[in-house]
Image: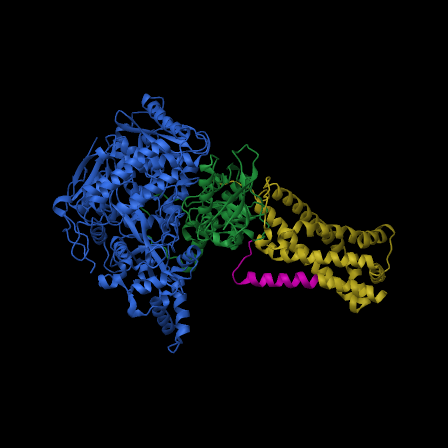
Amino acid sequence: MSFESKTPEGPLKDQWTNHKNNINLVNPANKRNIDVIVVGTGLAGGSASATLAELGYNVKSFCYQDSPRRAHSIAAQGGINAAKNYQGDGDSTYRLFYDTIKGGDYRSRESNVYRLAEVSANIIDQCVAQGVPFAREYGGLLDNRSFGGVLVSRTFYAKGQTGQQLLLGAYSAMNRQIARGKIEMFNRHEMLDVVLVDGKARGIIARNLVTGEIEKHSAHAVVIASGGYGNVYFLSTNAMGSNATAAWKTHKRGAYFANPCFTQIHPTCIPRSGEYQSKLTLMSESLRNDGRIWVPKKKEDVAAIRAGKLKPTQISEEDRDYYLERRYPAFGNLVPRDVASRAAKERCDAGYGVNATGEAVYLDFSSAIERYGKEQAQINGEPNASKERVLELGKKVVEAKYGNLFEMYEKIVDQNPYETPMMIYPAVHYTMGGIWVDYNLMTSIPGCYAIGEANFSDHGANRLGASALMQGLADGYFVLPYTIGDYLSNDIRTGKISTDLPEFEAAEKEVRERLEFFVNNKGTHSVDYYHKKLGKIMWDKCGMARNAEGLKEAMQEIKELREDFWKNVSVPGSMDELNPELEKAGRVADFLELGELFARDALEREESCGGHFREEYQTEEGEALRDDQKYTYVAAWEYTGNPMESILHKENLEFKEVELKTRSYK
Amino acid sequence: MNLTLKIWRQKGPKDKGKIVDYKVNDISEHMSFLEMMDVLNEQLINSGEDPVAFDHDCREGICGSCSMFINGRAHGPAEGTTTCQLHMRSFSDGDTIYIEPFRANAFPVIKDLVVDRSAFERIQQAGGYISVNTSGNTQDANAIPIPKEDADMAMDAATCIGCGACVATCKNASAMLFVGAKISQYALLPQGRVEAEKRAKNMVAQMDAEGFGNCTNTGACEVECPKGISLSNIARMNREFLTANLKK
Amino acid sequence: MSEKTTLTSSSIGRKVVMALSALFLILFLLLHFSVNFTSIFSEDVFNVASEFMGTNWIVQFIMQPILILGVLVHFIMGFYLEIKNRSSRQVKYAQYNGASNSSWMSRNMIITGIVILLFLGLHFLDFWVPEMKYKYIEGGTDATRYYEELVHEFSNPWRVLVYCLSFVFLALHLLHGFQSSFQSMGWNHPKYTPIVKRLGDIYSIVIPLGFISIALFHFFISN
């Protein structure tokens, strides 16, 4: 197993160019003889599949959904960052790099992040050429907006559906290659193991989810692009099917798993309404550009609101606590996600939560409506417009900006956010941690790559808004297709990999036995029963704030829950049919291991940084307290058969270009 | 609230299938429709029965997986809404709710409420793309200004989530709103104009080969489309297809 | 992208055939109505107009066959598409709430169409067959016969009733068909489509109502 970052020599800004100039390439005639498997068809997997196929490799793509277009990248709302500096507000590759490193609280690899910033501009060119209908200004040029935590406008967007449009772009590129026969698409297939031959990743075992057939697929390299593990919390903004199985199986076969405790809790989600809740819905962070976040100052107002005796609009300005503006005057409501989330939790824990569950704060658009209304009245030449007219005009402006989000909110909560403030609460949204990869995006298994949210690489301890889409597409379109050639250049004479090799047989047998166990177990509890329990442990003890005691308890509780799961889980139906419960069982089994490693990683990291907040390590004002002396490293875990006994490998992070500073948004 | 559910159960593609009655109790009006289905499935699992299979994933109205025909309407009674975003407040205590799969010959049932929508995939593969390499060596994104109106219209067409509600609700099981939206998105943008004619011909040919019915302009698709895709996209497709064929 | 498909065998091609024949029939109907309408205020004008239509060789030997062809194409294609469309969903829904998202007219063009077809049969028997017999077999040349025939036919209350009902169905057919044929041709425009729809509604009500009034007028005059 290899554990070197393989960061190229030389100054940061030349590294990627030099690296591309020096790595081995595969000649086009030889690419025809090389197969690559890509698992997952989100932004990373979809773009990688399309590009690899276009370069000439034979690609086999897998997704558990009935179409690649349904991967959960589709749900990203806000936008995608790129250092285009179209707005002329001083943006540059360096600034995007710097913001990303700082936003990630100095726990990411400089070289990777710089490369990300470098290729970001290409993404926009590429997507426009593909027909992605980004928002435009009246002059016909692309529009930008500013997004949580940064001081420039570098975010490109397509209404509130940027992820959808970018994914459909990648999907269209895939379709072109499917039509050419260069991508063989396997919809409704789930990867259940990776197969190693002579220590190299040479294929996967997948289950056809419709027929239940267990299939062996071989290739010269395997790319994991299966997204993040946010569903370890049961409730998250991930899709119901989002899972860590592909990543976790890869981990179990030897790929190190890095920084599992770095999880992002998104501040603006629709609060939970009851026990039956199956998932949480995100409201784009762009709302924070115009919405003001507050809770009542007085406990009696809180009680009256919860009892339904008082409406938020009846609370006067003096009795409102705009706590973000109070605590962080410079950034106000636009502080990074982790800061905003913790501040909300702090207020709710102190008893100021504004809904029945006590877990909600207000996001109020009334001042924005008024401000925009006055502006618009001025533009329309109605300086003496009445208050009603101003509000009417203001609502129109707000509708043009956030109409679809407001509509979505009203659909779910049944309240009109133009009239009454929205209620929001943080929810698990993105996992910065993931499979450890080197500069080439190769995991510690030779020939096995991880891209997009599935890897750990670019966001450190906290991801900035509109950076996930950027990373997914950067990895898939512009990084992996080149770096993979360096490895595959050694495989031009290998020839087809046979799926009759004993390694394939053995892996298939293991997969089959596990599935047989589930359908034959006839236990007493459904899979969801365990998933919900796991989720509760994770949220309570490994959530927005963690402490040593809670983490130790979590590890123990997860271990016990796992043991109970393997005794008492009940999976109806059989193996050889469409069986959603069986699919879930396998995924939850993996979450039950991942959750424990998560807690272990969080316990090990005795500092607070980004999304990882340890209560023991905070400043007097309650801000995160990093320990750069001891923890400026990537925690890469090696599987040994039991998460409790995983071995910690440290990749020390060197910062040559940036100086480590305490993040301050005051 | 307490409800009677009449759900289409079908073991597999070859099974004949039938409507089966179920009862669920104590359903909260704040639940989503799929959360109500979760309650039913938990109930079925605990009593040793096979849970109802249905497609769903993001549960926030964007992935296009969910596909239920509820009380005679695609995605149920609320307009502009996917099944996953339909909430139980649209129903009342004591209601009987019919739940069927999206039906069309081109959408064969796989199991219960799960249908095979791969016909949509093949239509997109026939031309739902711009033939440009993903190399990143394209021209600068701002090299071609595009009128905001055109970009907005293209975006409106591009918001299609490919759920198939248009097909399910159409009395003819026609897929023209879906295909029209895709053809329109590209036809409205200069990047897509280059291949617009071939695209219209090829996608329509594939649509026909899949066995969808023909459009009779009832407009039902536009009403039931969760993303409000406009009928004008079908007209645009007709126009594109006609001019393409009249030219050569 | 390589190319595949031909216009005539495609779904859209067939839609266009329906739309073009419909638009042609709509024009014809307007002409037919204009001629008939003269019968209300002038027997002579009606007879002159009818004689022109009945003897002009362009009308008789070019336009009349085209019209018959148009009618045949519209009906045959209509039936063909209806059968194909119905068979596109072999397993039917247990519950199907069509009224929630579309008009009755748009969903039942086949019913209104069949009624119109039956009516056309009757209409041919009433006017066209006797006319052909008279003109081309018996060799009759009376240029003032048209008005009398018209009045004679509309003196029968049952016939008038059937005619009136048929025109109601024609109105229903047109209420969807008029604007639908524009949509099928791809003529959809944010500015002009609302006007077309408006015009379509007016046409669909006024023309059948006009035909009904002509029938009633002659019925009441003759009784």
Query: Which residue is most to the left?
Result: A629
Q: Position of residue C35 (x, y in %)?
A: 75, 63
C41 left or right, relative to B132: right
B46 left or right, relative to C38: left
- The residue closer to the viewer here, A257 or A343, is A343
Shade of chain C as shown in the rendered figure: yellow
Q: Where is residue A650 in the image (x, y as percent from the top left)?
A: 17, 38
Q: What colour scheme does the image use?
A: by chain
Q: What stretch is highlighted in magenta?
A: C186-207
Shade of chain A as shown in the rendered figure: blue
- The residue closer to the viewer here, A170 or B66, is B66
Give the residue drawn at x 15%, y 49%. Answer: A657
Q: Quadrant of the C terminus of chain A?
A: bottom left
The quadrant in which residue A288 appears is: bottom left
Q: Where is residue A595 in the image (x, y as percent from the top left)?
A: 28, 39
- The residue closer to the viewer here, A125 or A612, is A612
| Residue A182 seen by the camera | no
- The residue closer to the viewer here, A169 or A211, is A211
Residue C191, above or below A120: below
B230 left or right, relative to C162: left
Residue A215, above or below C135: above
Magenta span has C201?
Answer: yes
Give the residue drawn at x 66%, y 47%. Answer: C78
Q: In which quarter of the image is the N terminus of chain A?
A: top left
The quadrant in which residue A240 appears is: top left
| Residue A1 seen by the camera | yes
Query: Which chain corresponds to the colour green?
Result: B
Q: Position of residue B70 (x, y in %)?
A: 53, 47
Magenta span has A449?
Answer: no
Q: Main secondary structure of the magenta part?
A: helix
